[in-house]
Structure formats: structure tokens, C-alpha cells
Image (cartoon, rainbow, N blue to C red):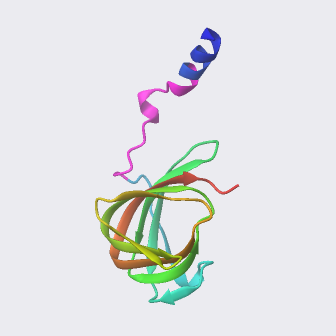
Amino acid sequence: MFRAVAATRLHACRGMSSITRLNTPAMEPTRASMAGFEPKLVSGNPSTKVFVQYKNTGDLICGTWECEPGSWQHNNKVDEYVMLLEGEMALKADGKEEVFKAGDSFVIPAGWQGIWEVRVTMKKYWVKHASA
């Protein structure tokens, strides 16, 4: 039992230099138009900025995403935690609509399908598993 706990602590303890701050991007963003993205656009022509600020050697990836107003069909392939920093958005599926505003945090489960609508230019922190 002690050996398993010790191994877990050793793996979990990393030096201070490994701390990643999401509010200070260390890279230029990837800029793109949703028009070339896999989902079908429903309205608008939103452009995005993506900062990938952390990716481990396993499957965890996180960063910041900004998007202008518009909507599209969306298929969430992996679980995603979102903390909405600015703006307003809605997720619509199965006749229901969930509206999120700056300050809201939520999880979009893997397999969720519906309409993603950005109502007011938004910025979010996101954490998810990298696609396999």
C-alpha cells in the first residue's frame, strides 16, 4: 500500500517550473475561419483565435479560445471543461437551450451534438483530452 501511495505522490509532485498560467499565452494564436471547420455553419462567418497553452505527453490539453458571433452544428468528440471569460453563448440540442455568460463554468460531455451559438464575441478557457 505504501509503495503505491509513494509512487502516486512522486508522479504528482512536479517542480514549480512546470506550472502553466493560462492568462499569459506563451505563443501566437492560431487564427481560423469557422467556414473551413468540420461542422456545418448555421449562421454568420465567425473567426476564431486558439491558444494551446498546455499539452502533456499523455492526453491532456488546455488553452484559450476566442470566437466571433455565429452558429454551427457541433459534435463534441471528448469531454470538455469550459470557463467562459467573456461574452455569451448557447448550446442547443433536443429542443433545449442552455445559455452561458461570462463567469459560467460547465462541462460539455463527449458525444454531445447540437448547435453551438456565439451570441456575443466570447473568450473561454478550455480543458479536454487530446484526440487520439
Taking depth in this image into account, of 1 and 121 the one nearest to the observer is 1
Q: Position of residue 27 (x, y in %)?
A: 45, 56
Taking depth in this image into account, of 88 and 99 the one nearest to the observer is 99
Left-right relation of 47 to 7 = left
Q: Residue at x 41, y 29 (%)?
A: 16
Residue 13 colored in magenta in the image: yes
In the rendered view, tell whether residue 77 sits above or below residue 33.
above
Q: Position of residue 118 (x, y in %)?
A: 40, 77
In the rendered view, tell whether residue 123 sits above or below residue 43.
above
Q: Residue at x 46, y 90 (%)?
A: 43
Image quarter of the N terminus? top right
In the rendered view, tell whether residue 37 sits above or below residue 102.
below
Q: Residue at x 63, y 42 (%)?
A: 57
Q: Which residues are magenta?
A: 10-24
Determine the residue located farthest toward the front in the rendered image: 95
Left-right relation of 112 to 67 = right
